[in-house]
Image (spheres, rainbow, N blue to C red):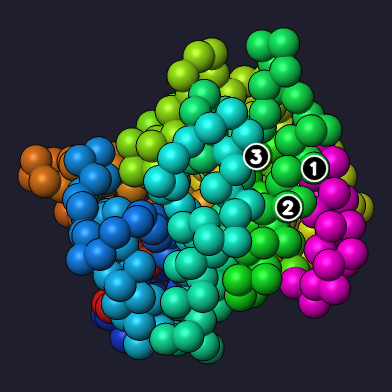
Amino acid sequence: MSQFPVRRMRRLRRTAALRRLVQETHLVPSQLVWPLFACHGEGVRRAVGALPGVFQTSIDELVKDAERAQRLGLGGIILFGLPAMKDGTGSEAYDEQGIVQQAARAVKRAVPDLLLIGDVCLCEYTDHGHCGVIQDGEVDNDASVYLLGKVAVSQARAGVDIVAPSDMMDGRVAGIRKALDAAGLGRVPIMSYAAKMASAFYGPFREAAGSTPQFGDRQSYQMQGTNADEAMKEIRLDVQEGADIVMVKPALPCLDLIRRAKQEFGSPLAAYQVSGEYAMIRVAAERGMLDEQRAMWETLQAIRRAGADIILSYFAPCAAELL
Ligand code: PBG
């Protein structure tokens, strides 16, 4: 029909004002969630070697970051914890005086309106570094689900607004929902890491969170990156079990899954731009190989364009500052 020279696509690209008018995908600070790492002590702000710009912070310092998140209008923060002691069952994860529980109370006291998410998992707290408890050399599903329910309840009691299980045990959303409801915490939503791939891009996080498995790997519970239909099944199960928000992780290697999940399910959809995705850009930029800000926007917009409503990213404060 009306093709060239009538149709000239470049007409709407000529000036910044025209490009702005026809921009289809937008990003606002309230769509961004900032991952933070809480450790014991006071006045601690320890840089993570594998993750430039990311710190392990004691609660007093973490509160400063939470205040910054609030000032920037971020969607929220998600807390990971570095326990004082690790053991076989990750007991600090469900201790009322655990690091995340203490941090949650302090953040809620200082910035009550900031949305606070608790990452629910055992891997930072177990001496073997797996996301569940070990029975006969394997990760025992149902015993782990029981403990994850306790983690969620203790975090919710400490004030987190959303619990986010990242362990990939079967039935954990149902188990956590049941535990929360039995504790009178029916109001607390669950954001499940529903389709979480066994990914090399979690490498730097494991240094930040001190959660590298001491034997084996996570392939008996995290998904194979090759399987899209299975990913949809995982998400469907979590929705049926009561997940209020579902997540796909990692983000850039899974843009097709984000798109399919957005089309197939009505639930709010989150995507996690994980540590390795962030580190690649940071380190390449440090070496002068690419422009950090442009690469940051390009990836965040791609994740939005694919269909994510919410993005968890270490770029959150930096992006919000520029928005
Ligand atoms: C723990 C957990 C992981 C991440 C979030 N929660 C690591 C893992 O599964 O090994 C990864 C986040 C990141 O890489 O930024 N269950």
User: Can residue 267 be seen here?
Assistant: no
The reply to whether discs 3 and 2 touch (Cβ–Cβ < 8 Å) is no
Q: Any magenta on residue 255?
A: no
Looking at the rendered structure, the kind of residue marked 2 is Lys
| Nearer the observer, 239 or 205 | 205
**Nearest to N terminus: mark 1 or mark 3:** 1
Identify the residue under disc 3.
Answer: 167
- Identify the residue at horizontal 46%, vertical 57% (top origin): 99
Q: Any magenta on residue 174?
A: yes
Left/right placement of residue 286 relative to residue 238 reads left
| Magenta region | 170-188
Secondary element at image label 2: helix
Where residue 96 sits: x, y (%)? Answer: 60, 61
| Nearer the observer, 142 or 225 | 142
Is disc 2 surrounded by few (<14), some (14 to 19) or many (20+) residues within 10 Å?
many
Closer to the eye: label 1 or 3:
1
Identify the residue under disc 1.
Answer: 146
**Nearest to N terminus: mark 3 or mark 2:** 2
Left/right placement of residue 247 relative to residue 71 reads right
Where residue 127 sits: x, y (%)? Answer: 49, 28
Q: Is mark 3 within 8 Å of ligand 1?
A: yes
The reply to whether discs 2 and 1 touch (Cβ–Cβ < 8 Å) is yes
Looking at the rendered structure, the kind of residue marked 1 is Tyr
Left/right placement of residue 2 relative to residue 284 reads right
Where residue 87 sits: x, y (%)? Answer: 53, 32
Left/right placement of residue 67 relative to residue 242 reads left
| Nearer the observer, 87 or 121 | 87
Above or below, 276 against 227 in this view is: below
Secondary element at image label 3: loop
